[in-house]
Image (cartoon, rainbow, N blue to C red):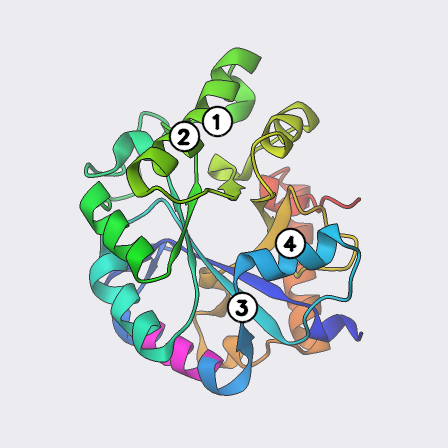
């Protein structure tokens, strides 16, 4: 398969108005989803993970939609669009803050405080077919915790979601994209796969327990989204990754098996 045809996992946060890189306006989101529906295959995260784990060919021209932090505006602004277009998505929840706001202690000061999904809304989303993934309990940087504390964050968030929804939780997203081989082993013992924040497309040797993603901020301009599945887009994301590697940010380090 040509490198330009490899799957892309998109990362969204809040679907709301604002100039924050964590926000995509509802109108732009609708435009993006309609374009994806008409031009590519939007597949569940598990389809890509299964192909990697089984060493099978990756689905071509496939996009996976992921939403980190469980912002409440997913329920009001994103879910109706995805339902209408019948597009699958995975929402990663920091379980200790469901029904509250993104006010965890490690939150950078520049991030505005926004409401998060409550458990009733999560249950409705599950009934509608959306997949719920774990994002820790307190959205802590797991690399700063003891092994015991990290295990509680990882397995505890899975248990809480499963108790609240009666559905199996198969995927994890590392808060802030920060992980280590030890943390990967803990995640491996609890989940089928995990998402990191590495800027990249999903290549055949990508680690299914530290999956690369493309932040929605990278494709805010319509022309950028329309570059998906071209060698130009692959080079664009690789350049983003190189810049972040120079800065020693998590987005700069691609995990391979």
Q: Residue drawn at (33%, 34%), measured in percent from left and top?
A: 163
Q: Secondary structure at mark 1?
A: helix
Which label was assigned to residue 159?
2
Badge 1 local density, few (<14 within 10 Å), some, or many (20+)?
some
Image x and y of residue 25, in percent: 28, 67
Badge 2 local density, few (<14 within 10 Å), some, or many (20+)?
some
Along the polypeptide, which appears first: circle 3 or circle 1? 3
Whether residue 124 is visible: yes
In which quadrant is the N terminus drawn? bottom right
Q: Are marks 2 and 1 in contact (CB under 8 Å)?
A: yes
User: Residue 139 occupies which quadrant of the picture?
Assistant: top left
Q: Residue drawn at (25%, 70%), measured in percent from left and top?
A: 80
Q: Residue drawn at (71%, 59%), measured in percent from left and top?
A: 51
Q: CA distance from mark 2 to mark 4?
A: 21 Å
Reading the image, the residue beneath label 3 is 43
* Magenta region, residue range: 29-36
Q: Secondary structure at mark 3?
A: loop
């Amino acid at each position: 398969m040509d490198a330009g045809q490899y799957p892309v996992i998109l990362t969204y946060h809040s679907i709301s108005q604002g100039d924050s890189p964590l926000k995509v306006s509802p109108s732009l989101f609708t435009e993006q989803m309609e374009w994806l529906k008409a031009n590519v295959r939007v597949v569940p995260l598990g389809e890509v993970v299964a192909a990697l784990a089984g060493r099978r060919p990756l689905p071509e021209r496939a996009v996976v939609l992921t939403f980190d932090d469980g912002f409440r505006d997913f329920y009001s602004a994103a879910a109706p669009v995805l339902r209408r277009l019948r597009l699958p998505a995975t929402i990663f929840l920091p379980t200790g803050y469901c029904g509250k706001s993104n006010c965890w202690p490690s939150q950078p000061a520049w991030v505005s405080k926004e409401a998060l999904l409550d458990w009733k809304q999560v249950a409705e989303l599950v009934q509608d077919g959306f997949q719920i993934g774990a994002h820790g309990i307190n959205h802590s940087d797991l690399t700063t915790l003891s092994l015991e504390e990290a295990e509680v964050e990882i397995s505890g968030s899975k248990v809480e979601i499963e108790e609240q929804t009666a559905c199996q939780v198969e995927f994890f997203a590392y808060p802030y994209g920060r992980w280590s081989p030890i943390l990967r082993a803990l995640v491996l013992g609890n989940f089928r796969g995990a998402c990191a924040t590495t800027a990249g497309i999903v290549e055949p040797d990508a680690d299914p327990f530290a999956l690369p993603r493309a932040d929605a901020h990278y494709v805010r301009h319509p022309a950028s989204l329309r570059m998906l599945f071209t060698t130009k887009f692959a080079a664009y994301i690789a350049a983003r990754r190189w810049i972040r590697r120079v800065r020693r940010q998590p987005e700069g380090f691609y995990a391979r098996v």
